[in-house]
């Protein structure tokens, strides 16, 4: 796969540089460093604008 098709971005939490294959706005991915779930908010000139996703953990009442 050529690197021209890859998109780049940075995790907003740990600032790890990410390089991923083409994705669409609204898609989610995980940061390989901090394991945070990220959502693609926008794609500008091959650069991803990422936003952290708040994960709601289930309260099992324990």
Image (cartoon, helix red, strand yellow):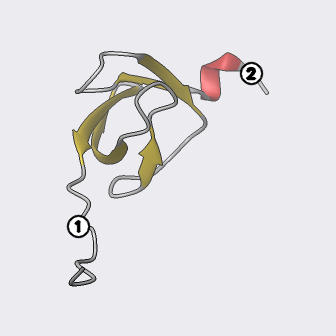
Quadrant holding the N terminus: top right
Residue 2: image tag:
2
Q: Is residue 43 above or below residue 40?
A: above
Residue 13: image tag:
none
Quadrant holding the C terminus: bottom left
Which quarter of the picture shows residue 11?
top left
Which residue lies at the image location 27% right of the left edge and 76% below the top edge? 58
Which quarter of the picture shows residue 45?
top left
Q: Is residue 19 left or right of residue 37?
A: right
Q: Is residue 51 above or below residue 14?
A: below
Helix, strand or loop at label 2? It is: loop
Q: Is residue 22 above or below residue 34?
A: below
Which residue lies at the image location 42% right of the left edge and 26% below the top edge? 46
Q: Is 50 in front, or is 61?
A: 61
Residue 14 % position (x, y)? 30, 19
Which residue lies at the image location 33% right of the left edge and 58% below the top edge? 26
Estimate the spatial distance between the alpha carbons at disc 1 and disc 2, rounded to whole Å: 37 Å
Residue occupying the far bottom of the picture: 61
Helix, strand or loop at label 1? It is: loop
Q: Earlier in the sequence, mark 1 or mark 2?
A: 2
Q: Residues within 10 Å of mark 2 (few under 14, many from 20)?
A: few
Q: Is 44 in front, or is 15?
A: 15
Q: Is 51 in front, or is 21?
A: 51
Residue 34 % position (x, y)? 40, 29
Residue occupying the far front of the picture: 62
- Give the residue at mark 1: 56
| Residue contact at pointers 1 and 2, CB within 8 angstroms | no
Nearer the observer, disc 1 or disc 2? 1
Which residue lies at the image location 38% right of the left edge and 23% below the top edge? 9
Residue 8 % position (x, y)? 45, 22
Q: Residues within 10 Å of mark 1 (few under 14, many from 20)?
A: few
Residue occupying the far right of the picture: 1
């Amino acid at each position: 796969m050529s690197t021209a098709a890859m998109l780049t971005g940075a995790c907003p939490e740990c600032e790890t540089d990410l390089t991923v294959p083409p994705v669409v706005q609204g898609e989610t991915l995980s940061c390989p460093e901090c394991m945070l779930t990220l959502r693609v908010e926008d794609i500008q000139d091959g650069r991803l604008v990422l936003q952290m996703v708040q994960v709601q953990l289930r309260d099992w009442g324990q």
